[in-house]
Amino acid sequence: MDLEDTRYKVLFLCSRNATRGILAEALLNTKGRERFRAYSAGTQPAGSVNHQALELLNRLDLPTQSLRSKSWDEFFGPDAPQMDFIFSLCDKTAAEKCPRWPGKPVTGNWSIPDPSLVEGTQIEKANAYRDVFNMLERRISLFLSLPLDSIDHLSMTHHFREADANLMHQPHTAVLHPASREF
């Protein structure tokens, strides 16, 4: 059996799959590559990856060559990988009627602000992307620290909700507050 067959499959969902899902996919595929295979998708994909997200990943030496904006429709059907975890990264996607995913994936909503909505100087915009990356990195680090092999589905769901509630109460930077209210 090859490594691909034994790793947990994780899908990150956003509406456009241009920034947040792309950052999360690249980050988990790097930090968790031994145990996880990450994917990202959108309900209404933009068709291209946000150039500022790609620039950030390149500056951080994270691989970008396989990243692309894609529809969640790619994750249905007989050839699609069966997901173990599905995380919505924006409130808009979390509020949409989700399809019935094959298998019984654990789901969660991480409610990450969209840095592409931030207006301001180039430095403020770059800081917004970096802040979102840092938020995703904290959540993914928490996710990677869970003893996934030894806890059941219900307990995992509880862990994700509790972690999300704790992280929601941490202060965000001033640059992100206006964007986070637009959701």
Image: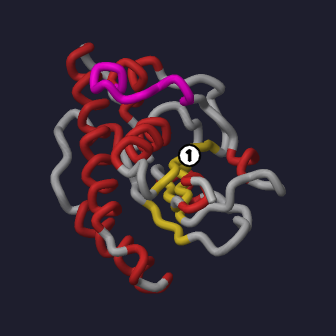
Majority secondary structure of magenta residues: loop
When the figure is inspected, residue 27 is found, relative to residue 160, above or below; the finding is: above
Which color scheme is applied?
secondary structure
Q: Is 142 placed left or right of 89 in the picture?
A: left
Q: Nearer the viewer, residue 48 or 10?
A: 10
Determine the secondary structure under disc 1: strand
Q: Residue at x 83, y 57 (%)?
A: 78
Q: Is 156 placed left or right of 98 in the picture?
A: left
Q: Looking at numbered disc 1 in the image, what kind of residue is underneath it?
A: Tyr
- Residue 47 falls in image quadrant: top right
Q: Nearer the viewer, residue 30 or 5?
A: 5
Instruction: Give the labeled residue for mark 1.
Output: 39
Q: Residue at x 38, y 71 (%)?
A: 160
Q: Number of labelled discs?
A: 1
Badge 1, how many Cα within 10 Å: few under 14, some, many 20+?
A: many
**Residue 38's spot in the image, x, y percent?**
51, 48
Q: Residue at x 42, y 22 (%)?
A: 54
Q: Residue at x 52, y 61 (%)?
A: 8
When the figure is inspected, residue 71 is found, relative to residue 50, above or below; the finding is: below
Q: Nearer the viewer, residue 176 or 154?
A: 154
Q: Is 122 placed left or right of 29 in the picture?
A: left
Q: Magenta region: which residues?
A: 57-67
Q: Is 130 one of the magenta-colored residues?
A: no
Image quadrant containing the N terminus? bottom right
Q: Is 59 one of the magenta-colored residues?
A: yes
Q: Nearer the viewer, residue 86 or 30?
A: 30
**Residue 25's spot in the image, x, y percent?**
47, 42
**Residue 44's spot in the image, x, y percent?**
67, 39
When the figure is inspected, residue 165 is found, relative to residue 57, above or below; the finding is: below
**Residue 23's spot in the image, x, y percent?**
41, 37
Q: Please, which residue is most extreme toward the top here?
A: 122
